[in-house]
Image (cartoon, helix red, strand yellow):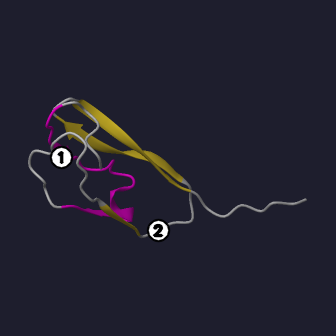
Amino acid sequence: MTNVSYSKNTFKVLPLPDDIRDCFDIQYQFPGHISAGISCDLHITFEPKANQDIISSIPILAETGMIHVPLECLTKKVDIS
């Protein structure tokens, strides 16, 4: 996660929606205030519980507002040529 604003910022990862919460483990160290242009790591582990597509987002609350990071985990599809 990179702070692309023009000032220091902080963020907090909010809980995932109930229907996908058990499929993901999100680990990060709360960085406090992040200066402009500085990054910090988010580690996301996916553990599928069912053979179905997941299209959602990771909700993140920053001082500048809500951020929704797209999250897509798709099952293999047959491609008949």
Q: Position of residue 54 (x, y in %)?
A: 50, 53
Kind of residue at disc 1: Lys
| Residue 25 part of the magenta segment | yes
Closer to the chain start, of discs 1 and 2, is 1
Dividing the picture into quadrants, the one containing residue 25 is bottom left
Mark 1 lies on residue: 12
| Residue 9 part of the magenta segment | yes
Q: Nearer the viewer, residue 38 or 81?
A: 38
* Label 2: which secondary element: loop
Q: Nearer the viewer, mark 1 or mark 2?
A: 1
Kind of residue at disc 2: Pro
Mark 2 lies on residue: 48
Q: Nearer the viewer, residue 60 or 49?
A: 60
Q: Position of residue 29 (x, y in %)?
A: 16, 61
- Dot 1 crowding, Cα within 10 Å, few <14, some 14–19, many 20+: some
The span from disc 1 to disc 2 (Cα, nearest Å) is 24 Å
Label 1 with label 2: CB-CB less than 8 Å: no
* Label 1: which secondary element: strand
Q: Residue at position x 18%, y 43% from top?
A: 11
Q: Which contiguous range is marked in magenta? A: 7-28
